[in-house]
Image (spheres, rainbow, N blue to C red):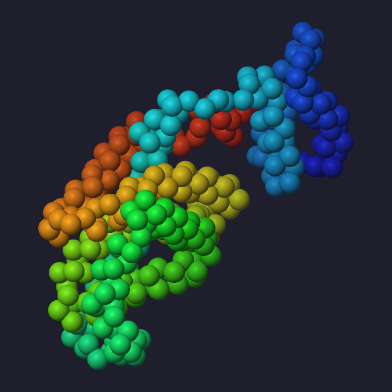
Amino acid sequence: MDLDAYVAEHGGEWRRLEQLSRRRRLNAAEADELVALYQRAATHLSLIRSRSPDPILVARLSRLVLAARNALTGSPSFSMAGVGRFFARTFPLTVYRAWPWWCGVATVFTMLSLAVMLYIVNNPEVAGYFATDEQINQLVNQDFAGYYSQYMPQNQFLRVWTHNALLTGMCLASGVAFIPVIYLLFANAFDVGLIGGVMIAYGHGDVFWGLILPHGLLELTAVYIGAGVGLRIGWAWVAPGPFRTRGRALAETASEGILVALGLIAVLLVSGLLEAFVTPAPVPYVVKDLAGFLVWIGFFVYVFMLGRKAHVEGATTEAEGEIVQAALPAT
């Protein structure tokens, strides 16, 4: 296909379609013209995608077709039904589809944390390479437990929620480049292992597990999901598969990544509430740990039951009414 000739032949129709799409009011003749031009532009987009997928032209026509569709049907409005559908189907489906990635990430870096922790417990003098004796005593006797009660609960909640959301977002976004997300995960896993090893080696293992498990199980799971989905996006660029271009594979997995990021905001909200209100609560450690464990298990049940159900039913992650390539006219 000669793209220059094709653009020259149909450019006038596209400009006219753009003009009609921007008008707030159309008479009957203009509305009929808009429908006809929209159908033709959708066909042009499908042909260009299949025969000569120039990314700039595809992006231009995609925006034009979507604008025309909105002009014909009206922009989608916010509804609680859409929110419910997102959390009942779309979010668990996207997380479920990526489970081999984030479960693999969780396994590798959890084992790393435990290995560092075990090494420090057996070789407590190694902690001296990373902190002075005064800093270690301060951590063990004051700082670790004091961290969870140094602010009012509502302030602590907002603080940890935004911090964890930023860390998870960085893991997801940097997954496409592989190395940055691995560095972030390694640094986080090493810090957890080092602090846990020091606390256990100095006889405060009950404090460490009692304060980190109520919120940490769900919090770390969210971080690992973000990292796993980010790595999945990067791998789609490396190995798009036999029936997709690299650009299309990247766009599809990245769009699912955005959905995961939106859902993880809510997951981290829950872990933030646990950290701010449950972790420092004046109740036995076993009670707090049990509460965190039940919430964590509940999340897995939610993802794998609803996600697998949506997957078996053939559900998609496309927004209702969204134009996808398969839905466009091919002739």
Residue at image x 44%, y 59%? 163
- Which residue, as the protein is rendered here, is positioned at the far top? 28
- Whether residue 207 is visible here, answered yes or no, is yes
Query: Where 197 sits versus 41, above or below?
Result: below
Query: Where 98 sits versus 285, above or below?
Result: above
Pinpoint residue 10: horizontal percent, then vertical percent.
83, 31
Pinpoint residue 180: horizontal percent, then vertical percent.
50, 69
Q: Quadrant of residue 302?
A: top left
Pinpoint residue 201: horizontal percent, then vertical percent.
18, 82
Residue at image x 67%, y 19%? 72
Q: Is 26 situated left or right of 265 in this image?
A: right
- Whether residue 116 is visible here, answered yes or no, is no
Pinpoint residue 290: horizontal percent, then vertical percent.
15, 53
Q: Quadrant where the C terminus lies?
A: top right
Residue at image x 85%, y 39%? 5
Query: Where 243 sits versus 165, above or below?
Result: above
Residue at image x 27%, y 46%? 299
Q: Is 290 situated left or right of 16 in this image?
A: left
272, 181: nearer the viewer: 272
